[in-house]
Image (spheres, rainbow, N blue to C red):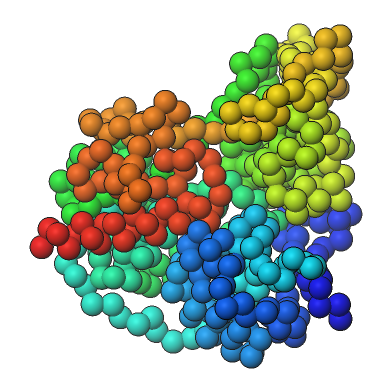
């Protein structure tokens, strides 16, 4: 074996997986996991840990894997992460822990994410025995939303003795993990298992409750000792171009919710979904990749990623881009929509686009796309999916007096996750706008500790 390279991850073949919703990556077996773990150099300064937003003791868990001590490895991970099976699948390790791995200086980094996934899956398959009972501290905390930030906050608080109640607007807990990320990247049984682990700790989940309508933050603060807002960023953005109101134009959020949460890809599903033959997905992030790959699996002959910058600026994970290419998704970069054109029935039939070039860097540090005059052209499509970002839903702000938000609608918090209201904390996409699962989890951990500090002062 070449120790400068990662042990390959087995996958479904591209020409098979682009026709089903089964998980693409098949996971390491124990022999491969041990071999990969032995690539770790056990660096004294542990740089990989500094790249983990939740601070997992990475060398320690990998050392246990190398010794075949998989449950010990899980215990190390679980000290800092409530969602290891999720993180092992969807976190951008290549830009976090693995980016700082010393092994990566003269080869490929240790496959930290793949090992985390293996350990979590092993535990979920083999673990037995009751959860250790936690002594209750008499404090009650309400958590709004059940995405990664909320689940992390709830888990950390429950482990420290709090009575935690999670309020979820949808009929199934999990937030973006269940409505936003496709089954082929994150099986929903995995999310359900992680949530069951929190229930075993005593966390209560109440679904079909829209905070801001069903009840208010003010009502929660009157009933609970502290409140955490992790309501995510589920409000889709559109471009404001001509034709966006035509039949066949959707937000990625709607498509993904129907596919992931409501199982529209299954025969006999109760939710309708538009199964187009030629689909343009506007955007270049992970959500755009998910929407495009779902469209392909739903039977589209042609699926295009339409992105206004070049491949070098594409924000999606490299692995997701590579998988999309393998599955037959076509990338139309340096291209931007101008208008969407319909027929007499108001159905989408074409999208007019213009070619772009990269100019000076914008405020994000990326070079700004500039239209090339005279380069307008038509793209034959019967469906357009907008995936250009999301914002926090304004409902909680609109119904909560004194809650400060920024110009983008994100809840304003200090470095400890505290909002402008005493006893109310927030984290994740509700604060930052759409970001990664692991960053949301990191914010949930920070807020949980801050809540514990706050509750200690209230004694």
Q: Position of residue 337 (x, y in %)?
A: 74, 20
Counting the numbered discs, the total is: 0
Tell me if residue 111 can be seen. Answer: no
Q: Position of residue 420 (x, y in %)?
A: 25, 38
Which quadrant of the structure image shows residue 413? Answer: top left
**At x 36% / y 60%, what residue is drawn?**
154
Q: Position of residue 280 (x, y in %)?
A: 77, 30
For the point 58% across and 28% down, which residue is it? 363
Residue under the point 15% across and 46% down: 222
Residue 4: where, in percent of width, then height? 81, 73
Image side of residue 96 versus residue 399, left or right? right
Please give left or right for residue 38 compared with residue 59 in the image.
right
Q: Quadrant of residue 200?
A: bottom left
Left or right: 53 in relation to 222:
right
Q: Determine the residue positioned at 68% across, 21% down.
A: 247
Q: Is residue 3 above or below residue 242?
A: below
Q: Quadrant of the N terminus?
A: bottom right
304, 272: nearer the viewer = 304
Image quadrant where one finds the C terminus: bottom left
Horizontally, is 352 left or right of 204 in the view? right
Q: Nearer the viewer, residue 99 or 246?
A: 99
Up/down of 46 relative to 390, above or below: below
Along the line of sight, the residue nearer the viewer: 216 or 443: 443
Is residue 108 visible to the viewer in this orientation of the structure? Answer: yes
Residue pushed farthest left?
A: 459
Instruction: Say which of 159 and 458 sits in front.
Output: 458
Residue 48, placed above or below residue 256: below
């Amino acid at each position: 074996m070449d120790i400068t390279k990662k042990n390959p991850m087995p996958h479904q073949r591209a020409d098979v997986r682009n026709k089903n919703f089964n998980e693409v990556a098949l996971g390491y077996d124990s022999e491969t996991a041990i071999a990969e773990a032995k690539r770790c150099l056990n660096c004294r300064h542990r740089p990989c840990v500094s790249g983990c937003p939740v601070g997992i003791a990475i060398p320690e868990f990998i050392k246990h894997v190398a010794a075949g001590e998989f449950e010990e490895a899980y215990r190390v991970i679980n000290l800092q992460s409530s969602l290891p099976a999720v993180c092992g699948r969807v976190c951008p390790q290549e830009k976090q822990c693995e980016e700082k791995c010393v092994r990566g200086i003269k080869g490929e980094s240790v496959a930290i994410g793949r090992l985390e996934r293996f350990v979590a899956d092993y535990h979920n398959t083999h673990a037995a025995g009751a959860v250790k009972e936690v002594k209750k501290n008499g404090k009650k905390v309400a958590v709004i939303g059940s995405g990664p930030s909320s689940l992390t906050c709830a888990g950390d608080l429950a482990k420290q003795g709090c009575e935690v109640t999670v309020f979820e607007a949808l009929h199934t807990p999990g937030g973006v993990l269940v409505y936003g990320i496709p089954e082929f990247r994150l099986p929903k049984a995995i999310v359900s298992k992680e949530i069951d682990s929190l229930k075993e700790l005593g966390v209560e989940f109440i679904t079909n409750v829209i905070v801001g309508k069903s009840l208010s933050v003010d009502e929660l603060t009157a009933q609970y000792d502290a409140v955490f807002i992790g309501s995510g960023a589920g409000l889709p953005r559109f471009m404001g171009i001509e034709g966006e109101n035509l039949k066949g134009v959707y937000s990625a959020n709607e498509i993904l919710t129907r596919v992931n949460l409501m199982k529209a890809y299954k025969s006999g599903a109760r939710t309708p979904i538009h199964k187009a033959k030629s689909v343009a997905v506007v955007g270049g992030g992970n959500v755009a990749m998910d929407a495009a790959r779902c469209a392909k699996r739903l039977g589209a002959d042609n699926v295009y990623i339409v992105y206004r910058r070049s491949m070098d600026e594409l924000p999606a994970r490299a692995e997701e881009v590579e998988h999309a290419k393998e599955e037959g998704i076509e990338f139309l970069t340096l291209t931007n929509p101008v208008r969407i054109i319909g027929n007499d029935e108001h159905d989408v039939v074409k999208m007019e686009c213009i070619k772009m070039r990269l100019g000076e860097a914008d405020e994000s540090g990326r070079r700004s796309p500039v239209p090339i005059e005279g380069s307008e052209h038509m793209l034959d499509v019967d469906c357009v999916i907008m995936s250009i970002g999301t914002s926090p839903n304004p409902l909680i702000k609109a119904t909560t007096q004194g809650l400060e938000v920024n110009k983008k609608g994100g809840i304003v918090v200090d470095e400890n996750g505290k909002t402008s209201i005493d006893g109310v904390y927030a984290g994740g996409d509700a604060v930052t706008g759409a970001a990664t699962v692991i960053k949301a989890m990191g914010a949930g951990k920070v807020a949980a500790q801050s809540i514990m500090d706050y509750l200690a002062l209230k004694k």
